[in-house]
């Protein structure tokens, strides 16, 4: 788990876009806003934010929302990186000093995109205050992933 130098431009841009997306989180129950931003292989950035529901199990993570938008555009296999931030919603904005990581479900969904694109997706995890950013590969966060190959689909 390495701290990423602020000079990592792609990561910084994705974290900034994720911070902007988090401002639009629909999180009236947890009061925890999450933003995500996907980077596609042509430089396109697709944002996502968490979207909660009174029936908690129907809530959507920010990463899933962004990946679904990429899929709608026919671009799921073009995902090369994602930036994720989150923190407590307060009267003045979103607060948090600790980077957040994708949940297990989101890691699995990211793995589907990685498998389709035949690449190891870069995951930038950031703090809500934007001060801390960590860079990982999906394979580090989801070792021994289950994917289409395990179903006999290549």
Image (cartoon, rainbow, N blue to C red):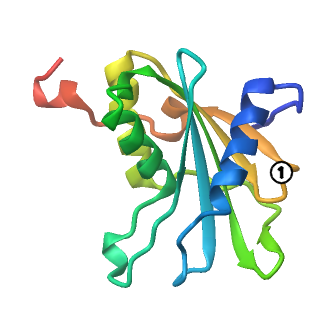
Q: Is 26 on the left or on the right of 152, as rendered? A: right
Within-10-Å neighbours for mark 1: few <14, some 14–19, many 20+: many
Asked whether, in this view, residue 20 is left or right of residue 72, the answer is right
Q: How many marks?
A: 1
- Residue 29 on image: x %, y %: 52, 84
- Which of the two residues, 2 or 48, is positioned nearer the viewer here? 48
Query: Which secondary structure lies at badge 1?
Result: loop
> Is any part of residue 145 visible from this angle?
no
Residue 72: percent from left, percent from top:
32, 37
| Extreme residue toward the left, this view | 152
Residue at x-position 58% and y-position 48%:
36
Q: Residue at x 12, y 31 (%)?
A: 151
**On screen, residue 5 above or below 84:** above
Percent position of residue 17, x then y: 69, 43
Q: Is residue 38 left or right of residue 17?
A: left
Examine the rendering and report whether any part of residue 23 can be seen.
yes
Quadrant (top left/top right/bottom left/bottom right) for the C terminus: top left
In the image, residue 77 sits, relative to residue 90, either above or below, namely above
Looking at the image, which is closer to me, 53 or 85?
Answer: 53
Q: Check the image and report above or below for 83 versus 31.
A: above
Residue drawn at 38 percent across, 69 percent down:
59
Q: Position of residue 114 (x, y in %)?
A: 40, 26
Task: Give the image quarter of residue 93.
Answer: bottom right
> What residue would you read off at disc 1?
130
From this view, report whether residue 57 is shown above or below residue 153.
Answer: below
* Picture residue at 37% right of the left edge, 79% below the top: 56
In the rendered image, the quadrant that contains the N terminus is top right
* Residue in front for this viewpoint, 122 or 146: 122
**Residue 129 picture quarter:** bottom right
Quarter assignment of residue 47: top right
């Amino acid at each position: 788990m390495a701290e990423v130098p602020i000079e990592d431009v792609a990561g910084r841009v994705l974290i900034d876009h994720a911070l902007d997306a988090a401002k639009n989180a629909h999180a009236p129950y947890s009061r925890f806003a999450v933003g995500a931003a996907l980077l596609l292989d042509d430089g396109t950035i697709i944002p996502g934010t968490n979207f909660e529901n009174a029936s908690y199990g129907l809530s959507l993570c920010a990463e899933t929302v962004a990946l679904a938008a990429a899929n709608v555009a026919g671009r799921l296999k073009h995902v090369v990186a994602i930036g994720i931030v989150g923190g407590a919603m307060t009267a003045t904005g979103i607060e948090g000093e600790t980077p957040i990581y994708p949940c297990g479900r989101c890691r699995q969904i990211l793995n589907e995109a990685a498998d389709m694109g035949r690449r190891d997706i870069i995951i930038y995890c950031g703090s809500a205050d934007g001060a801390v950013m960590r860079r990982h590969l999906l394979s580090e966060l989801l070792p021994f992933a289950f994917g289409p190959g395990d179903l006999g689909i290549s």
